Amino acid sequence: MTTNYDLSAVTHAFQIPGQFVTAAPYGSGHINDSFSVEYDDAGRRARYLVQRINHRIFTDPIGLMQNIERVTVHLAAKVAGQPDSGRRVLSLLPARTGLAWHVDADGNTWRAYHFISGARSYDVVESPEQAFQAARAFGQFQSLLADLPAPPLLETIPGFHHTPTRFAQLERALAADAVGRAASARRELDFALARRSITSVLLEAGLPSRVTHNDTKLNNVLIDDTTGEGVCVIDLDTVMPGLALYDFGDMVRTTVSPAAEDERDLSRVALQMPMFEALARGYLASAGSFLTAAERQLLAFSGRVITFEIGLRFLADHLNGDTYFKVHREGHNLDRARTQFRLVELLEQEQPRMEKLVESLG
């Protein structure tokens, strides 16, 4: 993570009371630079999350922040009056300009959130109950945003979950082979190219457009340290129009296997059916009332196609020279792709069983 920013000056641009004390890198995200910042206000310490938006990835950071402002204001109104409502929605601190963001002298766009204490995110699921809570939180997130007033949100990354486009990007990366890595990834490329037919299934099913999170990794929901409840959905950069099943599919990808996203030992990749059942139960408990019959029918399949899609993205980035995802070792993106593709194989094998489970939940 880049750390050569003057965080005291950056945070002073926001309406944060008191004096800057310290700042440190925070979190495990691949894209933005995130910092935990402490301020002292007359002897009372307060903590904030300050982030620099990666404008290489999010080419319209102002539009992105307008999305987040609309979404957080709407969500806050929906949960107002509920117990602990201040911890259930991310809350932006305004800049001294009155805007919900700050652009520094170098053109970097920054935002600041109140820090949500007493809860944390998990990179790897620890129990079916945790999976249930996360899925219910994401389903509730979709449900609360179902009546977000027009106009539609900006597509912060156009075609983000458009799987045929991701497949075409891999084909272009293969054709260019910009850094000469295709030969060493031949097995993964053959695996991907043999599954072109699954890329358009969701898009051709006539599913309705929804307001969706589009990046529902387990670590994008905060789990309460005491109660174990999924209390707040975070990382709203990709909240935009999409298919509800994109969100459920990415929950499956992130949660059903005990292996980390970049696990090198593929024998550790597994499909834990109790985790899948917990996801389905949690998601349907909060989102089931608005899902169509077609969405329910494809719920089990969505995990397979979204896992395949992220594998395509990791593999294409590997071929392109690691230009999108942050990497921490040689071949990191190839390791990530291999892990996704192994899970795709397991999801293929278990799809009939998963479909029966979803059907049994009504």
Image (cartoon, rainbow, N blue to C red):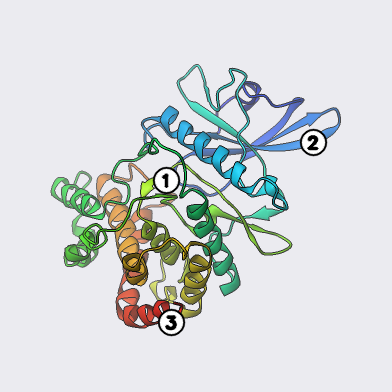
- The answer to whether 147 appears left or right of 87 in the picture is left
Q: Count of labels shown?
A: 3
Q: Quadrant of residue 131?
A: bottom right
Q: Position of residue 312 (x, y in %)?
A: 27, 56
| 349 relative to 140, above or below | below
Label drawn at residue 230: none
10 Å crowding of disc 2: few (<14), some (14-19), many (20+): few
Mark found first going from the N terminus, 2 or 3: 2
Amino acid type of the residue tagged 1 in the rendering: Lys
Reading the image, the residue beneath label 2 is 45
Mark found first going from the N terminus, 1 or 2: 2
Which mark lies nearer to you, 1 or 2?
2
- The answer to whether 254 appears left or right of 81 in the picture is left
Q: Position of residue 342 (x, y in %)?
A: 33, 71
10 Å crowding of disc 3: few (<14), some (14-19), many (20+): few
Identify the residue at image location x=29%, y=51%.
318
Front residue (pair 133, 55):
133
Q: How far apart are labels 1 and 3 at the CA level? A: 41 Å
Mark found first going from the N terminus, 1 or 3: 1
Front residue (pair 69, 102):
69
Reading the image, the residue beneath label 3 is 360
| 319 relative to 108, above or below | below
- The answer to whether 206 appears left or right of 211 in the picture is left
Reading the image, the residue beneath label 1 is 326
Amino acid type of the residue tagged 2 in the rendering: Arg
Q: How far apart are labels 2 and 3 at the CA level? A: 50 Å
Which mark lies nearer to you, 2 or 3?
3
